[in-house]
């Protein structure tokens, strides 16, 4: 306050300065000014008297200071406000996150922090505006958990981003991982778009490109082509990624040129994008190369594979990486890349008009089956081809190692993502019913939330079987945690039956029954809570 | 009485929690699972909560108080069961039905209500009986008070001596002599039964070496302490209200005996501070009709929360009795006849300049005032560039006047809540405003609804 608290009369402030100097050095060495002392009096007491008067006078006469430059106001948020109950719930979820954890066993109470991502997703789905007073807690939560950021920043909106500028701890928000919260001009306002593209920060430019791409794919491409040559390699990679949205034959020329990029990552990404355009010249070239290696075998119902003998300059220009990773043969490596990048439509033509299912069932000569199927899996994922994915996934009830198609859980999880939601849930439900829960975690993770009824039933049944078998519930804590977040809240009533302590069987581990009962209690209360959260957010 | 169906909000319930861990624990109990026999009615909420033992805990909350009773062994107040029960009650529209109070809850509620009634009756016909009692013990009490005043005078004289010695040798030496000197002096003041002086002396000890202008601040505080010593020693010559203020400042507690004010008191802010031994809870309230602002203090010994807990934003009908002393805002809550959920509108407010003027005026009654409660209407939090760490001001939205925020306000998470609420636009802020700047305690923002948002 020193800038504001100097008295109006110069004698006052000069006198004060002298009093301070005298006090600092001591009245013995530096007696206070004569005006405050009396002959024969104690100079120290006189100094204190005078200082007391001046202090009270300074405080009583305090004037306001001149304001610093006012911040630009936060952009208006026109989204509707949260319903009251949902507002309070969010406060509770965020408070729970901030409070110290009790530690130890979780007991039967739900873990509110785990419900925050779902709450945010639902709120964003309804398009609500975040309550201003909760923005700091929301940003703190997003800072602590990177997985929350896209949803949290989208929910925080323009005001959240505005706020983040003032606190260095929230810098992450300005890097705009998802670009969700960046203040963007109207994408139809060409001069504004142009300006931001020319002058914006990287995060703003990525977000802008994303936004324009969503509205006007050709416009975004034009924007990108304009400055392409001057962008840094890692920026080029991120920009190129935005073309995944609305990819069309119109992008082919640009991508073909990017195949000659200085950066290998850019070249690979361009090749990947081109391979998703089955009619592109690139896809045709790859199809020809791949078809030269894979053809009907000499015997009926077989495929003969003859991998490429060399990786020529043309292949390398099309993104084929010549050097294999350690432990893989060169020719197999090249074959994998060719098949992965070739449009899947080529194979029925090459292999006697068979369907994907029939093709996958064919036996492959000389032990190339695994290589070929794995490459087809990658191609099906890349090209989002449901029919091929279905063929490669095979029958869920089959033991994973038997039968055609892939047996890798990781590949299966990726292939499942290409199937329609309902079919995906059914497939995983059948898998769980046949094989139990121990291998199901990855597959459950790609299913839509809340889980469709048959899937939910299959999981609950499998949990009940595990309990009957007498094992401890923490062997299934991963699936339990998923179930808390993903089961349809409607399952709560059915699960109520399982919350009681089961009859202890001979084979059961000691005390397992109680733990199971507790675990089911928690599952049920979490589901009830999720139902309440969902209802509170309903407009 | 609390009308049926008037419920507190979840925020108000959470504000009653003594600490963050209790908030969390209470939140976990706010599900139907562990509860049975829950009900509400006649201004109370009750329920049985399954704990670790075979017998469930009996939890009752008298929401007109509020007062809490739980059979659990927790030393926290209110305990997590009371919080969980209130959260359940606040959040669950289905349990709106009024029930009859079960016997086990009535056994606590009824005698409690009777006691409150009796107290109220006693207070309303205050007069004859009490003053006779006072006269009986009067002579002994007077002699005790005289002895204590003598001790304090001796302490004040000694302190005077120490202050003038310090000034004679120079404040520069205070930086070297360290904290021990002040601790010892403070202990002498405790012996002299002047806890107010002791606390101020202890604060002096923290100033040397604390930032660039510490000699100026140390001189200010030494001078004000000197003013207090001399005021005490010459208290016979002071007007009685100021003498009462001096007595309070040196640490003599007088009972609240001012003219009672019956009003609907809006609860603007509640926050705790601790000196390691005692937790002090400060609750600011504002009378809707009287327009008076008052401070309710409540204390808790180490590890215990203060007894009085009021939900910010709520409104309390009752009588406040002011403590003696000019410009003293502290009051005692005597009669209390109902607590309702807000929304509490902000008290009438003004500009930054008006707030500083109000502080200046208040200094006339009590020159030792650090700050004064004010409402700042339409102010914008503004960041001040430069320096180390964040610095902020509150600036009039339509004008060129501002007041800096105090270091205490800058280090609280409430700062960011305030900035978020404002979004660069005007908000109304209830703050303690003084020579060190403003400490915002609650804010009202146009878009956030009529309820005050607590900032501490």
Image (spheres, rainbow, N blue to C red):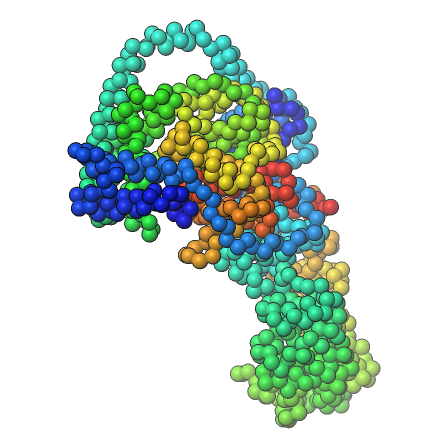
Residue at the image point whose x is 38% and y is 8% from the top: B133
Q: Residue furthest right?
A: A353
Q: Position of residue A531 (x, y in %)?
A: 68, 45
Depth check: B324 or A465 in front?
B324
Q: From the viewer's perspective, is residue B328 above or below residue B442?
A: above
Occupied quadrant, residue B106 = top right
Residue at the image point whose x is 51% and y is 29% from the top: B293
Q: Position of residue B33 (x, y in %)?
A: 60, 38
Q: Is residue B153 left or right of residue B196?
A: left
Q: Is residue A51 left or right of residue B338?
A: left
Residue at the image point whose x is 30% and y is 43% from the top: A15
Depth check: B153 or B97 in front?
B153
The answer to whether residue B429 is visible is yes
Depth check: A332 or B455 in front?
B455
Q: Position of residue A243 (x, y in %)?
A: 69, 74
Depth check: B190 or A240 in front?
B190
Q: Is residue A437 left or right of residue B210?
A: right
Q: Is residue A11 left or right of residue B344?
A: left
The answer to whether residue B200 is visible is no
Q: How many marks?
A: 0
Q: From the viewer's perspective, is residue A6 above or below residue B54?
A: below
Q: From the viewer's perspective, is residue B115 above or below residue B357?
A: above
Q: From the viewer's perspective, is residue A337 above or below residue A70?
A: below
Q: Position of residue B227 (x, y in %)?
A: 30, 32
Residue at the image point whose x is 35% and y is 39% from the top: A55
């Amino acid at each position: 306050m020193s800038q504001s608290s100097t008295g109006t009369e110069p004698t006052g402030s000069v006198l004060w300065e002298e009093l301070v100097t005298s006090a600092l050095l001591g009245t013995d060495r530096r007696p206070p000014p004569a005006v405050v002392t009396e002959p024969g009096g104690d100079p120290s007491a006189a100094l204190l008297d005078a200082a007391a008067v001046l202090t009270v006078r300074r405080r009583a006469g305090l004037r306001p200071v001149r304001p610093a430059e006012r911040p630009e106001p936060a952009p208006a948020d026109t989204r509707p406000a949260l319903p009251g109950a949902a507002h309070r719930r969010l406060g509770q979820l965020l408070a729970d996150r901030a409070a110290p954890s009790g530690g130890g066993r979780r007991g039967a109470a739900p873990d509110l922090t785990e419900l925050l991502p779902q709450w945010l997703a639902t709120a964003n789905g309804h398009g609500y505006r975040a309550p201003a007073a909760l923005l700091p807690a929301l940003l703190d939560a997003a800072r602590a958990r990177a997985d929350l950021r896209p949803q949290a920043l989208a929910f925080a909106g323009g005001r959240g981003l505005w706020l983040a500028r003032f606190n260095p701890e929230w810098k992450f928000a300005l890097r705009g991982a998802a670009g969700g919260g960046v203040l963007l001009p109207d994408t139809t306002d060409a001069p504004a778009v142009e300006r931001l593209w020319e002058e914006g920060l990287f995060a703003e430019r990525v977000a802008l490109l994303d936004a324009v791409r969503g509205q006007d794919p050709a416009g975004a491409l034009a924007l990108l082509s304009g400055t392409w040559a001057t962008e840094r390699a890692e920026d080029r990679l991120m920009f190129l990624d935005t073309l995944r949205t609305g990819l069309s034959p119109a992008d082919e020329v640009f991508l073909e040129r990017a195949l000659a990029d200085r950066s290998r990552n850019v070249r690979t990404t361009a090749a990947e994008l081109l391979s998703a355009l089955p009619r592109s010249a690139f896809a045709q070239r790859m199809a020809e190369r791949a078809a030269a290696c894979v053809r009907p075998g000499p015997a009926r119902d077989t495929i003969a594979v003859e991998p490429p003998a060399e990786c020529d300059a043309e292949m390398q220009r099309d993104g084929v990486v010549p050097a294999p990773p350690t432990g893989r043969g060169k020719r197999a490596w090249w074959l994998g890349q060719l098949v992965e990048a070739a449009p899947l439509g080529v194979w029925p033509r090459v292999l006697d008009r068979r369907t994907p299912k029939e093709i996958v069932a064919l036996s492959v000569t000389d032990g190339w089956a695994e290589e070929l199927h794995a490459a087809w899996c990658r191609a099906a994922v890349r090209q989002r081809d449901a029919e091929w994915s279905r063929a490669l996934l095979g029958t869920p009830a089959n033991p994973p190692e038997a039968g055609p198609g892939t047996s890798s859980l990781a590949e299966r999880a990726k292939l499942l993502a290409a199937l329609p939601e309902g079919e995906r849930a059914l497939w995983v439900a059948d898998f769980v019913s046949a094989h139990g829960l121990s291998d199901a975690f990855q597959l459950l993770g790609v299913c839509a939330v809340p889980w469709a009824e048959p899937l939910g039933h299959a999981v609950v049944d499998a949990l009940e079987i595990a309990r009957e078998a007498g094992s401890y519930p923490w062997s299934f804590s991963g699936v339990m945690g998923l179930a808390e977040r993903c089961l349809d809240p409607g399952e709560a009533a059915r699960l109520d039956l399982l919350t009681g302590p089961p009859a202890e069987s001979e084979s059961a581990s000691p005390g397992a029954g109680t733990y199971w009962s507790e675990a089911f209690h928690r599952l049920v209360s979490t589901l009830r809570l999720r139902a309440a959260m969902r209802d509170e957010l309903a407009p | 009485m609390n009308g049926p169906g008037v419920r507190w909000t979840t925020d108000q319930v959470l504000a009653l929690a003594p600490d963050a861990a209790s908030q969390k624990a209470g939140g976990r109990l706010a599900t139907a699972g562990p509860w049975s026999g829950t009900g509400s009615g006649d201004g109370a909420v009750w329920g049985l909560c399954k704990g670790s033992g075979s017998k469930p805990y009996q939890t009752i909350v008298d929401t007109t108080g509020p007062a809490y009773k739980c059979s659990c062994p927790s030393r926290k107040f209110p305990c997590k069961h009371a919080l969980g029960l209130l959260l359940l009650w606040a959040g669950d529209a289905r349990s709106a039905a009024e029930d009859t109070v079960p016997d086990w809850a009535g056994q606590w509620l009824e005698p409690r209500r009777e006691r409150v009634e009796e107290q109220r009756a006693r207070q309303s016909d205050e007069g004859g009986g009490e003053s006779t009692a006072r006269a009986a013990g009067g002579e002994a009490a007077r002699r005790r008070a005289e002895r204590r005043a003598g001790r304090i005078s001796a302490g004040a004289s000694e302190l005077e001596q120490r202050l003038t010695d310090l000034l004679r040798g120079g404040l520069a030496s205070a930086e070297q002599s360290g904290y021990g000197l002040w601790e010892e002096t403070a202990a002498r003041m405790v012996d002299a039964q002047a806890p107010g002086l002791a606390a101020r002396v202890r604060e002096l000890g923290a100033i040397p070496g604390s930032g660039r202008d510490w000699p100026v601040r140390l001189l200010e505080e030494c001078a004000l302490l000197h003013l207090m010593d001399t005021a005490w020693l010459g208290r016979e010559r002071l007007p009685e209200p100021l003498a009462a203020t001096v007595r309070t400042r040196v640490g003599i507690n007088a009972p609240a005996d001012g003219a009672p004010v019956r009003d609907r008191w809006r609860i603007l802010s509640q926050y705790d501070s601790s000196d390691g031994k005692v937790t002090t809870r400060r609750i600011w309230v504002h009378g809707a009709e009287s327009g008076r602002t008052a401070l309710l203090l409540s204390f808790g010994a180490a590890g215990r929360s203060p007894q009085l807990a009021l939900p910010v934003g709520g409104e309390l009908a009752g009588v406040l009795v002011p403590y003696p002393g000019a410009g003293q805002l502290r009051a005692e809550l005597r009669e209390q006849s109902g607590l309702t959920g807000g929304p509490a509108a902000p008290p009438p407010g003004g500009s930054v300049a008006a707030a500083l003027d109000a502080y200046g005026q208040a200094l006339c009654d009590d020159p030792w005032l650090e700050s004064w409660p004010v409402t700042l209407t339409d102010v914008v939090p503004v960041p001040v560039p430069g320096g180390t760490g964040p610095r902020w001001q509150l600036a009039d939205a339509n004008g060129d006047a501002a007041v800096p925020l105090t270091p205490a306000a800058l280090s609280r998470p409430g700062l960011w809540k305030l900035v978020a609420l404002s979004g660069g636009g005007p908000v109304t802020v209830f703050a303690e405003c003084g020579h060190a700047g403003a400490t915002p305690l609650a804010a009202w923002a146009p878009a956030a609804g009529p309820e005050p948002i607590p900032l501490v």
